[in-house]
Image (cartoon, helix red, strand yellow):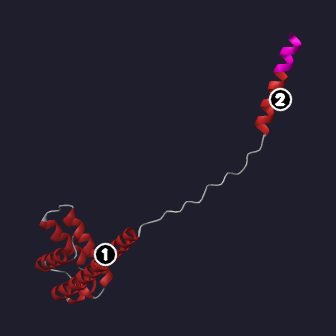
Amino acid sequence: MRTTAAGLTAAALIGLLTACSATTEDVSTPEVTISVPSEASSAIASASEEAGAALDAATEAAEGAWDRLEGLAAAVEPELAADADQLQQRAEEVCADIEQGTDEATVTSNAQERFSGGDVGQLTEEQAQQLVEAIRSTVCP
């Protein structure tokens, strides 16, 4: 009886070892094709065109806003519009002050400090207020 039990145990172990050492075959995923009805394709194309047109309009509006700001800034002090990149960076800082709910006097004071110096010279408080209004009306959301 011991011999039979030992034989069965050995056979079971051999079976397990054989199963563990078996190699696995690569299983590939089947190709899936999705058909979209022509009405849906047309709707997707139309929505894509509308989104593209909206993006173009938004880009054009943003560029127009920066152009208007340059003109308004030049009206306050011609040298403010001399460096468009610097004007944009500082205007974005003013917008950030406004968005954060900073009080008007501080927004004006910060603008006066940001935009004064170099070829611009020292802006007056009135010029800073005009500049803040120009920024608010053109490029701040």
Please give the range of residues in magenta. Answer: 1-8
Question: Residue 123, percent across and down?
Answer: 17, 80
Question: Residue 130, percent across and down?
Answer: 13, 79
User: In terms of depth relative to the viewer, which is nearer, 16 or 134?
Assistant: 16
Question: Residue 124, percent across and down?
Answer: 14, 79
Left or right of residue 74, residue 25 in this image: right
Quarter of the figure with residue 56 = bottom left
Residue located beneath label 1 in the image? 50
Left or right of residue 128, residue 6 in this image: right
Quarter of the figure with residue 51 = bottom left
Q: Which amino acid type corresponds to the residue marked 2 in the rendered image? A: Ile
Q: Quadrant of the N terminus?
A: top right
Left or right of residue 61, residue 41 in this image: right
Residue located beneath label 2 in the image? 14
Extreme top residue here?
Answer: 1
Does 15 appear above or below 28?
Answer: above
Q: Which amino acid type corresponds to the residue marked 1 in the rendered image? A: Glu
User: In terms of depth relative to the viewer, which is nearer, 121 or 34?
Assistant: 34
Q: Residue at x 83, y 20 (%)?
A: 8
